[in-house]
Each structure stands twice: as structure tokens, then as C-alpha cells.
């Protein structure tokens, strides 16, 4: 059996083992029996996908070319794990509480669930990572060909190997990466397989290292001596490069989609980070321990021109250790495959969630029901995305034809991914960071990275030599590797410096000058203050707690009563005792609909999402939204107030109009009455004066009689005009009262005398003068006028055979009351209410005046602070005059 | 021929003045001063002309006129209506109700005599 066949067989067997392990782990996890699967050890090992085929082979090559500088690649992550574990913890906590599925999702979520940002980050990642994936394919191919070179019987097609390799990895990723729909449900199978691969690659590198140090060099000291002797032993540190690459490695460690996948998405328990904080640097230390020895010995022993990237493989082969080489190959294979699988999974999640699904939904139309088949569609989208990404990597590999040094493509990818860092870190720690700021920063960084790093780094003449040397259109300051005239920097340093600094600057400046939307503010608070109000690692559980949270939130928004009735109704529908329903999808959806009526769809979705998604919504979070809501409420209450005011004004106008109409009618009636009262005596006057003038031979008797009528009617007119004037003065309030001291008896004496004058048969007036000795302080003349009117009325209207009027005075509760009661039939019940109206007369025949007397009385009494009323059921006509006795009440 | 005029007016002085004028002209004048039974009085008296005041106690002259016009025998009886209210609306209403002549107080004696003469002449011609 040839070595190559053996390698193929081992590879197939190895892949089969991986399948079995992944499958078994998935099964165990599904049964909940795989506690060891969720151990910090597995988590730490899974982080080792940071070490790809590039690290496995490339580190030695890197060391062989640049000496110790390769350490920067390990230094970055180590610094992050040791010095920034608290930042990672925040990231993990947010990832869990927000159900983050990818780095694109994280950025989009943080900045108000912006789909534009998600798409941007996704595209950035795909562009950065695709060459990186083809790099892995290349490393496997190279190692394969290295083995083949030592096998005289080798007969294989390189293209075929790459193709089948790619297809196999795609199948693996699809099988284990898309078993579950929810990206937040962890892929235990894949993670376990990766952990196994981490062990394999570490063991392989250690084995080669041990072989090199103790077998080839003869011991540690000899090895050190060899290193010192080799050109890489010279201690050359380019500070700029070191810092740049360390920084890039650190940034990439946090931002790489596959790292985010294993570190955040696949994290079972954030306490695992505590272990990983020391265990992962240890792993890195171990895996990099023998890099320098292998490089030094390789340079020493291997013929000049041998690719140092393959030393790990070619050294054992050259020493005729095929089994060790096989193990080494397996290590490299593990590194490459694990990276490809996880990267493809992570990218496919992003592509399907942020690009394929939105497009599919767009084409499906908003009217389509998005419930039944959507699950199937999402899985399909994810599988297709994995296939697409792998195909892209394969295509890129075919197009580029390989050849470029592995490390340079890796660094370019790092620099691309690092563009996400400002948005990520800003999002975690700065509430003022906005979506537009992020968009600006990412765009600037992405463009600069493409121009200064990606396009020149790919080679293949993507940017013409002319442009590289003199800039586009001869603009020297735009030269890709000497931007703004800065020359003399290594390309990677130059690119990192410009792209990241301008990215961060754009991010900060635009953020400062733009305002976050409510959604951004809510998400910002959720992210930045995640520790203040999200449950710990073993926090919330149980649906009742969620229902309670929903209830509390709904009460705040809907008001207690409406919320309670909504929940009680839902509980009744679910046939549950008590007031709290299970938060079933149906209920949650309904609640969200109801809430969106109050606070808008986005806010309702966010708030319900926070609770159903797991973490309790704190008051502070709600405050951010409440700012907006308060404005909305204020606006609506203003509108309400305005509409209330409007309807009040309308009502007032209507009332005023009615009043005016009434007044107008009254005025018409009044004028018509006045006209009538004036014209009637004038008619008599005119008629009789014409008779006197025109009639010849009128008897003296008749002449006198007619002249008397004229005289009486003239008096009547005068009286009417007096009354009208009097009433008008009283009504307008322009009357001046002549307040004097006096006694009731005197006023009544005067009134009786005046009223009785001129009547042939004055009615008998019954008084009790002793009782009437009441001191008054009022307008005595006006009061007398009232009394005169009342007595005259009795005189005119009392229909008794022997008309009599009782005048009864008394003091009751500081008020003087004087009743005028005659022995007639009184005012008919149906007109008692209107006796005080102007021009009212009980009967026309007996009317001496115009019917203004009682109206005037009422006005006078109101001016005096008293009252006049008709007393029903007092036998005859009965009026009561009442007057306050504020100052004087005692009889003298 | 001695014509008979029925004068319905509640104001005694006006009543006396008109009665004096018409009597002097040779007409036979009957008077009534209450609105309530005015229609019945007209019917029984069967006058050649009615002088009707608008504002009467008990019933308004307008209502009385309408009732009269509703009775076949009295539909074409000349009615001279007097009013002390100076509103044109009243004239419109009266004309609609079928008044023969409408006159606003105060009037000159000559006006009243002319109106009564005209109305009686028309009634004779037809």
C-alpha cells in the first residue's frame, strides 16, 4: 500500500471518526446526558479553531522567514484572553441574552436591528473569509502534494483532491451545522468534533517538535544552539509590525465569524470563559512551542528552496518517518477542516439570515403567510449558503492558482475582519454609538482595506502596476501602499493604520453628530448595561416568570386593568387557573399586536422580544423607549386636550348662539310688545283727535269725553315710557340706589296711600303695624315702588266681592319677609311661573299698564339684594318680598 | 241698504272711536271684544264686513281669520284686519290666511272709512 493511498485511507477514516463523534455528541446532547460535552475543556479546545492550517503549517514558514515575529499571531489572542476576558464575558452575555446568531447579527442588533448593517458586515466577512477558506484548501492540497512527492508511485489529480475535499467539508458542515434551526441552539456535534481536531493538531505538532528536538537535534541545548546559529535567531523586532500584527490578531480573534461562532454562539456557560482565559493561552503556548526549533532545524537540514511552510511535513518525510508525517498531515488536515467547517457554518448563518431570507421574503411578498414553511426555507437557505461559500472558496482557489505565501493572505483576512472592531467595541461600551456612525466607520474601513490591502495583496494584477506605483489617474496620494504620501511602512502596517484609524474616526465623529433612534437606544442600553439587568448564567427559568414579566410590562404600557383583562382572558382560553397564561407563541404574538397599538410595532417587538428572549427588561431600558413614547403620549394628549377644547368651544358657541337666538327672539317679542303697547294708546289718541277736529257739531258732552280719553291715553303712554325706561335702567345695572335708614311701617304706609289713590273702592288692607316696626337700610323709594305695584295689582286683579289684602311682615334668619296675600282667586297655576315676565298680563281688560310692573319689581328686588316670588297655594294672589337685614335686624 | 259691520276689538277706546266713525257714515255696527268665541259670533251675526284686531284676549285674530276662511259661507266675507304690532311678517301671514285688507295702528280715520267703503263695494259687485 502506497503512502498516498494510506493517506487517503487515513483521511477517510479520520473523517468517518469525526462524523461518528459529531453524531454521537449530538445524540448525547439531545438526551441531555452529555455533561462532559459542556465542559470548559471542550469550550477551550473549540477555541483552537483560531489555529488553522495557516497556523499549523504557516507558523513554521513564518518563523523561517521572519524569525520570532510569528509569535505576534499567538500574542494577540493571548492578550485578549488574559487582559480582556471581561470584555469577552460581556460579549458572551449579550450574545446569550440577545440570542445573537453571528457577528453580523450582533452589530445589526446593537444598532437598532439595522438590516443594512447586517448585510454590510456579512459582505465584509464573506469577502475576507473566502480567500481564507481557499487558503485552507490550498494548505491541504500542498500537504498532499508534499506527501505525494515522496511517493514514487504517486498518481493523483490535484484538482480532484481539492474538489472532493471541498465537497466533503460542505457535506459535513451541512449535516452537523444545519441540524437545528435556531442558531442559538448549540451545535454540540460540531463543537465536539472540533475539540477532537484541536487535540489531534496539538498532538501532531508536539510529536513533530519532540522528534525534531530530541531525535534530530539531540536535545534542548543543541536545538537552542542551532536556533542561535540560524539566520532567524537574530533578534530583530520591528515595533510597528509587531504592534500591528499583534493588534490585528487580537482583533481578528474577537471579530472572526468562526471565532464568534465558537466563543459566543456555541458558549454553553459564560463561566467557561474563566477556564479558557488561562487554558487557551496555554494551548497557544504549547502549539507554538516547537515552531522555532522546527523552523531552525528545517532550514538547516532541508535543501535550499524547500517551502518552509511544509517543514512540519517534509522534515519527518525526509528523515523517513512516514507515520510521523502522516500524523503531522492529519494535524494540518484537522486544522484546515475545522476552520473551514465552522467558518462555512458561521458565514452561512449570516448569509441566509441577512441576505437570502430577506430577499426570499421580498419575493414572496408581504402578503404571504410566513409561518408554516418558513422553517424549511431557513434550513434550505442555510444549506445552500454553506454550499455557496464552499463553492466560492473552491472557485477562488482555482482562480488564484495558489502560490502566494499562506501567512500574507491570513493577515489580509485579519485586517479585513478587524474593520468590525470599532463598531463592536463601541457597541459594547458606548451608548452614544449610532447606526449611522457604524455605517460610516465600516464603509470607510472596508473601502480602505480593499484598496490598500485586499486588492494589492491578492496579486494576479487586480490592480495594475501603474496604479500601484503612481496612484489611480496619477494621483500619487492614492497609491494603495503609500496612502496620503506615507511611504516606507510595511504594507500590512500601512493598511491597518489607515483603515482602522479612519474607520474609528468616522465611527466616532458620525456617532457624535447623529441621534440614535429609540430602537438603537433600547438596544444600546441592553448591550452596554448588559450586566446590570440580565440574568446570570443560571438565571431565569420557567414560563411563569416570563408571564409575570410580560404582565408587568403590559401593565406599564396598557394600564393595569386592560393588561389584567387581556391576560385573564388568555389564561381562560388556555384553560388555566389564575390570571397568568402560558407565554405560547400565539399569546405572545397577540400581546405584541396589542402593545404595538400603544407604543408602535418596533418598540413592542423589542420589548416582548427582550422578555421572551430571556432577559428581564429593566426600567432603564424601558426609559429609553419611554422617551419616545412619552413624546407620543404627550402629543396625543395634547391632541385630546385640543379636541376637548374644540368641542367645549363648539358647545359654548352653540350655547351662545342659542342664547343669541333666544335673545333675538325675546328682543323681537319685546319690540313687538312695546310697539303694540305704544301704538294702541296712540291709535285712540289719533282717532279721537281727528274726530274732534273733523266732526262738525259735536256735542259739548262728547267733546269733553273724547278729550278725556285722549288725556288718559296720553298718560298711559307716559306711564309706559316711564316703565320702559325704569326697566331698562334696572336691567342694565346703571341704576343708582339711594340707600337710607327707615322703618318698614313707614314705607308700607306710603305705599298703601299711593296705591289706593284714585280708586273709588279701595281694597281693605290688613296690617299689623307693631310687627312692621323693623328698621331698614335700603333704597326706601324703590322698596315703596315694589309695594305700590303689589298693592295696585291686588287692587286691579282681586276678584273677590269684598277685596281684601293681608300684609304680613316677619324677620326670619336675618331676612325680612313681607307677604301680600289677597282674597281673590289668585294667579292661574299655568301662568304662575311667568307672572314676572315683561308684558305679562293676567287679563287684558283689567290691565292698566303694559304688563311691566312685576318685571320691574323683580329687577328692583334683585338690585336690593332681595327677592320677590309668587306663593302658590296661599288662597288668593300671594306675593312674598324678601330682603336681607345684614346691618340692622332688631325692632326699635 | 243699511250695511252691517262687526267690529272685534278688545281696546275699549279704539272700539268706541271706530264705532263712532262707522255709525256716522250710516253703517250698522256691532262690537265684540273677546277672541275665544269670535268665530261663533261672526257666524251668528252674519255681517257684511268684519273688522278684526290681531291681538285679542283668548284667541288671536290670525287664528280667527283662518277659521273663518275654513267655513264655506264665510270664505269670502270681507275682513279688515288691524294690528298694533309693526311687523311685516304679520302682514304676510295675514295675507296668506286670506285677509281682505291689512291695516297697522295708528291709522287715520279717513283710511279706515275708505277701506271699509272699498271692501263693501267689492262685496256688493261680486
Image (cartoon, coloured by chain):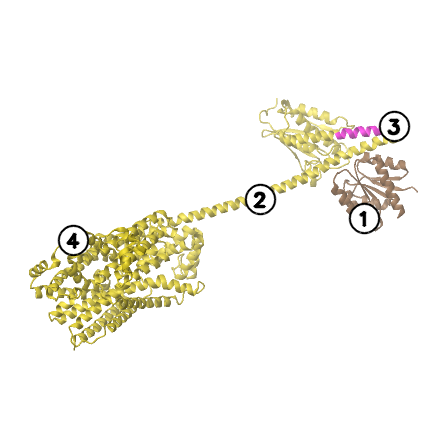
The verdict on a common chain for dots 3 and 4 is yes
Q: Is residue B37 above or below residue A884?
A: below
Q: Are marks 2 and 3 in contact (CB under 8 Å)?
A: no
The answer for how far apart the CA atoms under marks 1 and 2 are is 45 Å
Where is residue A485 shown, x and y percent of the image? 26, 51
Give the residue number, with chain letter if any, for mark 3. Answer: A701
Task: Please say whether residue A713 is one of the residues in the magenta stretch.
Answer: yes
Q: Which chain is brown?
A: B
Could you tell which of marks 2 and 3 lies nearer the N-terminus? Answer: 2
Q: Which residues are magenta?
A: A698-717
Give the residue number, with chain letter if any, for mark 1. Answer: B69
Which of A64 and A547 lies nearest the eye of the viewer? Answer: A64
Give the residue number, with chain letter if any, for mark 4. Answer: A237
* Disc number lying in front (2 or 4): 4
User: For this view, does A535 lie left or right of residue A581?
Assistant: left
Where is residue A887 shown, x and y percent of the image? 58, 25
Q: Are marks 3 and 4 in contact (CB under 8 Å)?
A: no
Chain letter of disc 3 in the image: A
The answer for how far apart the CA atoms under marks 2 and 4 are is 88 Å
Which of A496 and A428 lies nearest the eye of the viewer? Answer: A496
Q: Are marks 4 and 1 in contact (CB under 8 Å)?
A: no
Q: Quadrant of the C terminus of chain A?
A: top right
Q: Is residue A260 visible?
A: no
Q: Quadrant of the N terminus of chain A?
A: bottom left
* Disc number lying in front (3 or 4): 4
Could you tell which of marks 2 and 4 lies nearer the N-terminus? Answer: 4
Where is residue A589 shown, x and y percent of the image? 41, 59
Give the residue number, with chain letter if any, for mark 2. Answer: A651
The verdict on a common chain for dots 2 and 3 is yes
Amino acid at each position: 500500500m502506497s503512502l498516498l493511498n494510506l493517506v487517503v485511507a487515513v483521511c477517510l477514516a479520520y473523517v468517518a471518526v469525526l462524523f461518528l463523534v459529531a453524531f454521537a455528541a449530538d445524540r448525547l446532547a439531545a438526551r441531555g446526558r452529555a455533561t462532559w460535552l459542556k465542559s470548559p475543556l471542550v469550550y477551550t479546545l473549540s477555541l483552537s479553531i483560531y489555529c488553522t492550517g495557516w497556523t499549523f503549517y504557516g507558523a513554521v514558514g513564518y518563523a523561517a522567514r521572519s524569525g520570532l515575529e510569528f509569535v505576534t499571531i499567538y500574542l494577540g489572542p493571548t492578550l485578549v484572553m488574559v487582559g480582556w476576558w471581561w470584555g469577552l464575558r460581556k460579549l458572551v452575555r449579550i450574545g446569550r441574552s440577545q440570542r445573537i446568531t453571528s457577528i453580523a447579527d450582533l452589530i445589526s442588533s446593537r444598532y437598532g436591528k439595522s438590516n443594512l448593517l447586517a448585510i454590510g458586515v456579512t459582505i465584509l466577512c464573506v469577502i475576507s473569509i473566502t480567500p481564507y477558506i481557499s487558503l485552507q484548501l490550498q494548505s491541504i492540497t500542498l500537504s498532499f502534494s508534499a506527501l505525494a512527492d515522496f511517493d514514487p508511485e504517486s498518481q493523483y489529480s490535484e484538482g480532484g483532491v481539492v474538489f472532493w475535499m471541498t465537497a466533503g467539508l460542505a457535506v459535513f458542515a451541512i449535516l452537523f451545522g444545519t441540524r437545528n434551526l435556531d442558531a442559538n441552539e448549540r451545535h454540540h456535534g460540531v463543537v465536539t468534533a472540533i475539540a477532537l481536531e484541536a487535540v489531534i493538531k496539538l498532538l501532531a505538532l508536539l510529536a513533530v517538535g519532540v522528534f525534531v528536538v530530541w531525535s534530530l537535534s539531540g536535545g534542548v541545548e543543541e536545538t537552542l544552539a542551532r536556533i542561535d546559529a540560524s539566520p532567524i535567531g537574530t533578534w530583530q523586532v520591528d515595533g510597528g509590525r509587531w504592534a500591528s500584527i499583534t493588534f490585528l490578531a487580537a482583533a481578528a480573534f474577537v471579530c472572526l465569524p468562526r471565532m464568534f461562532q465558537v466563543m459566543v454562539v456555541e458558549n454553553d456557560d459564560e463561566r467557561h470563559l474563566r477556564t479558557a482565559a488561562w487554558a487557551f493561552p496555554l494551548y497557544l503556548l504549547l502549539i507554538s512551542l516547537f515552531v522555532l526549533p522546527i523552523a531552525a532545524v528545517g532550514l538547516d537540514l532541508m535543501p535550499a528552496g524547500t517551502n518552509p511552510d511544509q517543514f512540519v511535513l517534509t522534515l519527518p518525510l525526509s528523515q523517513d518517518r512516514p507515520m510521523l508525517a502522516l500524523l503531522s498531515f492529519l494535524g494540518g488536515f484537522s486544522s484546515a477542516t475545522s476552520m473551514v467547517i465552522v467558518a462555512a457554518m458561521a458565514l452561512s448563518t449570516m448569509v441566509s439570515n441577512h441576505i437570502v431570507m430577506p430577499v426570499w421574503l421580498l419575493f414572496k411578498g408581504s402578503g404571504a403567510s410566513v409561518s408554516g414553511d418558513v422553517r424549511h426555507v431557513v434550513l434550505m437557505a442555510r444549506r445552500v449558503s454553506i454550499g455557496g461559500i464552499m463553492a466560492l472558496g473552491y472557485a477562488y482557489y482555482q482562480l488564484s492558482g495558489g502560490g502566494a505565501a499562506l501567512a500574507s493572505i491570513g493577515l489580509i483576512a485579519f485586517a479585513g475582519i478587524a474593520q468590525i472592531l470599532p463598531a463592536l467595541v463601541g457597541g459594547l461600551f458606548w451608548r452614544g454609538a449610532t447606526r449611522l456612525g457604524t455605517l460610516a466607520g465600516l464603509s470607510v474601513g472596508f473601502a480602505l482595506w480593499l484598496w490598500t490591502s485586499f486588492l494589492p495583496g491578492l496579486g494576479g494584477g487586480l490592480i495594475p502596476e501603474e496604479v500601484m506605483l503612481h496612484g489611480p489617474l496619477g494621483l500619487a496620494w492614492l497609491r494603495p501602499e503609500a496612502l496620503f504620501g506615507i511611504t516606507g511602512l510595511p504594507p500590512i502596517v500601512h493598511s491597518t493604520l489607515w483603515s482602522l484609524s479612519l474607520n474609528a474616526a468616522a465611527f466616532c465623529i458620525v456617532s457624535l453628530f447623529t441621534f440614535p433612534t429609540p430602537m438603537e437606544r433600547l438596544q444600546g442600553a441592553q448591550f452596554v448595561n448588559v450586566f446590570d439587568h440580565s440574568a446570570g448564567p443560571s438565571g431565569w427559568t420557567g414560563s411563569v416568570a416570563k408571564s409575570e414579566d410580560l404582565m408587568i410590562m403590559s401593565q406599564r404600557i396598557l394600564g393595569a386593568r386592560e393588561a389584567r383583562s387581556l391576560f385573564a382572558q388568555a389564561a381562560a382560553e388556555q384553560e388555566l387557573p389564575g390570571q397568568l397564561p402560558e407565554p405560547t407563541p400565539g399569546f405572545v404574538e397577540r400581546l405584541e399586536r396589542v402593545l404595538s397599538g400603544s407604543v408602535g410595532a418596533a418598540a413592542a417587538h423589542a420589548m416582548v422580544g427582550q422578555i421572551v428572549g430571556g432577559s428581564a427588561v429593566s426600567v432603564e431600558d424601558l426609559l429609553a423607549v419611554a422617551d419616545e413614547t412619552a413624546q407620543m403620549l404627550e402629543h396625543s394628549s395634547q391632541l385630546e386636550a385640543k379636541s376637548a377644547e374644540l368641542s367645549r368651544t363648539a358647545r359654548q358657541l352653540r350655547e351662545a348662539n342659542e342664547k343669541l337666538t333666544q335673545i333675538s327672539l325675546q328682543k323681537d317679542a319685546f319690540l313687538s310688545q312695546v310697539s303694540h303697547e305704544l301704538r294702541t294708546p296712540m291709535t285712540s289718541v289719533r282717532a279721537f283727535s281727528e274726530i274732534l277736529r273733523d266732526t262738525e257739531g259735536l256735542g259739548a258732552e262728547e267733546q269733553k269725553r273724547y278729550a278725556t280719553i285722549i288725556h288718559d291715553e296720553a298718560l298711559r303712554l307716559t306711564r309706559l315710557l316711564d316703565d320702559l325706561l325704569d326697566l331698562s335702567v334696572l336691567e342694565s345695572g346703571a341704576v343708582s340706589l339711594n340707600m337710607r335708614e327707615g322703618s318698614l311701617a313707614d314705607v308700607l304706609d306710603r305705599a298703601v296711600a299711593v296705591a289706593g289713590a284714585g280708586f273709588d273702592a279701595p281694597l281693605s288692607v290688613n296690617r299689623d303695624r307693631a310687627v312692621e316696626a323693623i328698621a331698614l337700610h335700603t333704597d326706601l323709594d324703590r322698596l315703596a315702588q315694589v309695594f305700590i305695584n303689589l298693592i295696585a295689582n291686588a287692587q286691579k286683579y282681586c276678584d273677590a266681592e269684598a277685596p281684601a289684602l293681608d300684609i304680613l311682615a316677619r324677620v326670619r334668619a336675618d331676612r325680612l319677609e313681607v307677604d301680600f296675600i289677597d282674597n281673590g282667586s289668585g294667579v292661574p297655576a299655568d301662568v304662575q311661573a311667568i307672572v314676572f315676565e315683561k308684558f305679562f298680563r293676567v287679563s287684558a281688560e283689567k290691565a292698566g299698564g303694559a304688563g311691566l310692573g312685576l318685571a320691574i319689581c323683580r329687577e328692583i328686588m334683585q338690585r336690593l339684594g332681595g327677592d320677590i316670588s309668587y306663593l302658590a297655594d296661599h288662597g288668593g294672589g300671594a306675593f312674598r318680598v324678601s330682603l336681607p337685614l345684614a346691618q340692622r335686624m332688631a325692632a326699635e | 241698504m243699511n250695511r252691517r259691520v262687526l267690529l272685534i276689538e278688545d281696546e275699549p277706546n279704539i272700539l268706541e272711536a271706530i264705532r263712532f266713525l262707522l255709525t256716522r257714515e250710516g253703517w250698522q255696527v256691532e262690537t265684540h271684544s273677546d277672541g275665544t268665541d269670535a268665530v261663533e259670533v261672526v257666524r251668528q251675526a252674519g255681517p257684511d264686513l268684519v273688522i278684526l284686531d290681531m291681538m285679542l284676549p283668548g284667541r288671536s285674530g290670525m287664528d280667527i281669520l283662518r277659521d273663518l276662511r275654513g267655513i264655506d259661507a264665510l270664505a269670502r266675507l270681507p275682513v279688515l284686519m288691524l294690528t298694533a304690532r309693526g311687523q311685516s311678517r304679520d302682514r304676510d301671514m295675514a295675507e296668506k290666511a286670506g285677509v281682505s285688507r291689512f291695516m297697522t295702528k295708528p291709522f287715520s280715520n279717513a283710511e279706515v272709512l275708505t277701506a271699509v267703503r272699498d271692501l263693501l263695494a267689492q262685496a256688493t259687485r261680486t
